[in-house]
């Protein structure tokens, strides 16, 4: 099982200079994948990213969100697809399979329902008491309420936190040009501890489901 994130930039057409968001988006995608053939920007303000290790998907979504929210006036809509790829091409635009269909169709539905983070998967639920998509879409809806309201300053702090692999806040403070206490306050306002707890939960579920399917 792999994952695909399909996204589009909110408010992209409100400015003449598209590089305001385009360059930060490219930098974000280059950070989350070492293989530039695994992503593509298309239709002006949309993009698609293929991720081999599905358990890292939410963390990468957080990072992309932080990068775009750190630009005043911009936001991003992210649709996560989980599943299998049936045709492997050199670029994501030529690849195909349920994972691509899941991500693309989910983004279309999100636009209509004004939701900025959601997922759709091929995961088969063996128990009526457990539905992966239902559970995590509820979690993501709450997470999105938090992340949609990040200020530019909080988003920048989250971005640097991930770039430094949750490193020393003193180093983050040095990069921004503020003191460590201010960094801590920005991260607290971003509810980053809760967001990362959700990421840990997501990783555990994906790992367990993947291990079960392989056994």
Image (cartoon, rainbow, N blue to C red):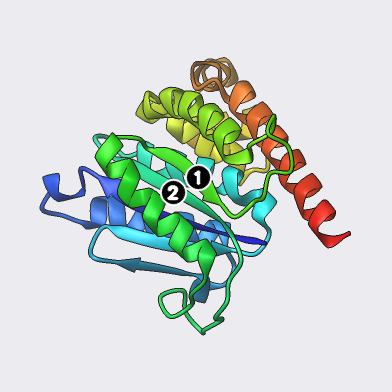
Q: Which residue is mark 1?
A: 119
Q: Which residue is mark 2?
A: 79
Q: Secondary structure at mark 2?
A: strand
Quadrant occupied by the N terminus: bottom right
Q: Residue at x 63, y 37 (%)?
A: 131
Q: Local crowd at mark 1 within 10 Å, few (<14), some, or many (≥20)?
A: many
Residue 28 left/right relative to 56: left
Given the current orientation, which residue lies at the most extreme bottom position?
Answer: 90
As displayed, is residue 215 above or below residue 60? below
Observer-nearest of 24 and 181: 24
| Rendered image quadrant of residue 160 | top right
- Tag 2–tag 1 contact (CB < 8 Å): yes
As displayed, is residue 1 above or below residue 58? below
Q: Position of residue 60 (x, y in %)?
A: 56, 48
Q: Position of residue 25 (x, y in %)?
A: 38, 55
Q: Residue at x 59, y 68 (%)?
A: 34
As displayed, is residue 19 above or below residue 145? below
Q: Position of residue 17 (x, y in %)?
A: 15, 54
Gap between marks 2 and 1 measured at Cα = 6 Å
Q: Residue at x 58, y 25 (%)?
A: 192
Q: Secondary structure at mark 1?
A: strand
């Amino acid at each position: 099982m792999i994952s695909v994130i399909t996204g589009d930039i909110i408010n992209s057409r409100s400015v003449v200079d598209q590089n305001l968001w385009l360059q930060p988006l490219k930098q974000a995608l280059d950070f989350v994948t070492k293989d530039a053939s695994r992503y593509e920007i298309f239709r002006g303000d949309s993009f698609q990213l293929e991720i081999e290790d599905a358990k890292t998907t939410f963390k990468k979504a957080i990072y992309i969100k932080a990068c775009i929210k750190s630009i005043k006036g911009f936001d991003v809509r992210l649709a996560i697809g989980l599943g299998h790829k049936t045709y492997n091409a050199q670029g994501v635009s030529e690849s195909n399979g349920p994972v691509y269909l899941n991500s693309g169709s989910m983004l279309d539905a999100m636009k209509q329902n004004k939701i900025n983070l959601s997922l759709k998967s091929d995961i088969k639920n063996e128990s009526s008491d457990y539905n992966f998509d239902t559970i995590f879409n509820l979690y993501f809806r709450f997470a999105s309420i938090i992340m949609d309201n990040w200020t530019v300053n909080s988003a920048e702090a989250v971005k640097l936190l991930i770039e430094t692999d949750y490193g020393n806040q003193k180093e983050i403070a040095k990069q921004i040009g503020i003191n460590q206490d201010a960094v801590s306050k920005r991260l607290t306002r971003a509810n980053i501890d809760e967001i990362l707890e959700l990421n840990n939960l997501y990783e555990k579920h994906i790992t367990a489901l993947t291990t079960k399917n392989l056994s």
